[in-house]
Amino acid sequence: MNVTPFRFLLAILPRFFESRKAPADAPLVLWLNGGPGCSSSTGLLFELGPCSIANNGHNTTYNPHSWNSDANIIFLDQPVNVGFSYADDGTTVSTSPVAGKDVYAFLELFLNRYPKYANAPFHIAAESYGGTYAPNFASVIFKANHELSLAPNPKIKHINLSSIILANGLTDPYIQMGSVPDYVCDGPYPVYDDPKGAQCEALRTKVPTCQRLVKSCYNFNSKFTCVPAMAYCNSQLFGPLMRRLNLVFNTLSWAHDILETGLNPYDVRRKCDRSEDKDGQLCYKQMGWIETWMNEPSNKAALGVNPEKTFESCNMAVNQAFALNGDGMHNSAALLPELVDGGVRLLVYAGNAGEPHSLCVHHPLLCCGNSRSASWNTRLSRNPLLSLLVPSCMAGWPLWRPMIVSRRCLALSNLYARPPSSSGSTSVKGRPRSPATVVTRPFQA
């Protein structure tokens, strides 16, 4: 078993935070933001880290809802060239499976250098495109553990993979892309006033072709089938809703109609003024503050990074490289049953008022009352480790509406799936207590 060279931020430890409560007994969590190509500094300084960005990026404040109240947490910038991470040999990464090998290499190096964490329960928590990352990374770890059990090597640590946590994650594009019209037309916070109007009907006509192309990607697992699926589904299903924002996604941009109404695409219950002196392009001015903080020379010196390197929240070259391989159209959900069968617990949580690419549309696979996810749920429910499934929690709503989720909706698989708030992929920031309460339960179990 070979461990690839270390290609990450050398000063990773300043972004490792011990638990506030009994760190020697606490689990170890790896947090990953999405993109692809976006830095986990967003999670660190805006969502669940011990400190929150403040004062226009010139200071931080204590976060009482940080996940490190109950866990030791690593915030990792990956793949290589994201944030301050780099490769000495100029190597790049453009697919999630390859990125998973690098993450595994990092974890082996980390646990060999700090063996006191090696026996702790290990959790992978990932947001948005992390719904593609996490199943791939967990699969690499799971298989490496199996190989190690067959051929023990004292230089390689068994990673005590305990659970996967998916936060508004892109996991099964066939279902999720096909669910976009249901959310924007029939969801709890519809973008269009008339679910039977021309705009909604036009969107629905695009679903069969999108799903046919995605299915071809699933079947042939090639960029020659996956890139066309990504191009068509993004342009035809997201295109009518979006205009280019050139920050988070290069191949798709945010909801044009949502932005025209002045709503926040991450939480459509709220207004957004996208001018730079107000909410900013991403509707949260704190996102810009993070780059200010990370590019402060004294902070660079503390991290031990190249003072000449400019920190960017998202590396669009990395994003484009993943898009040109069609990485986001692969079925990451297909990797999960083997992991659950092997005893790895699974937690999925989502909001229902966020951007359509990252709420229940991102993972209806475990949303209750969703007929499109019935076969996936059925497959999971055959596993003896599953403690509970609640398929009737959507009583009163037509089962064909996969985008509509109740705050009460629970589906427990070895762990559980839950929409803890009504916001989207920044729900950790929007209602910090709720996701923190839900997610830290497995840490305490």
Image (tube, grey):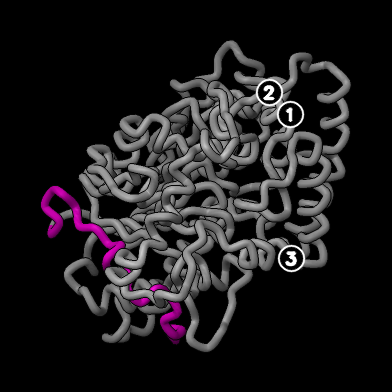
Q: Is residue 358 magenta?
A: no
Depth check: 228 or 402 in front? Answer: 228
Q: Assign a secondary structure to mark 2.
A: loop
- The picture places residue 99, in percent across and down from the top left corner, at 53, 70
Residue 363 falls in which quadrant of the image? top right
Among the two numbered marks 1 and 3 on one chain, the one whose residue lies closer to the N terminus: 1
- Is residue 30 shown to the viewer in this render? yes
Q: Is residue 114 above or below residue 89?
A: above
Residue 324 marker: 3
- Is residue 158 shown to the viewer in this render? no
Depth check: 239 or 52 in front? Answer: 52
Q: Assign a secondary structure to mark 3.
A: loop
Residue tagged 1: 257
Q: CA distance from mark 1 to mark 2?
A: 6 Å
At 11% from the left and 52% from the top, the residue drawn is 22
Residue 261 marker: 2
Q: Which residues are magenta?
A: 1-24
Other residues around mark 2 within 10 Å, as few (<14) / some (14–19) / many (≥20): few
Q: Mark 2 or mark 3, which is nearer to you?
A: 2
At 24% from the left and 69% from the top, the residue drawn is 118
In contact (CB < 8 Å): disc 1 and disc 2: yes
Q: Is residue 23 magenta?
A: yes
Amino acid under disc 3: Leu
Q: Is residue 275 above or below residue 35?
A: above
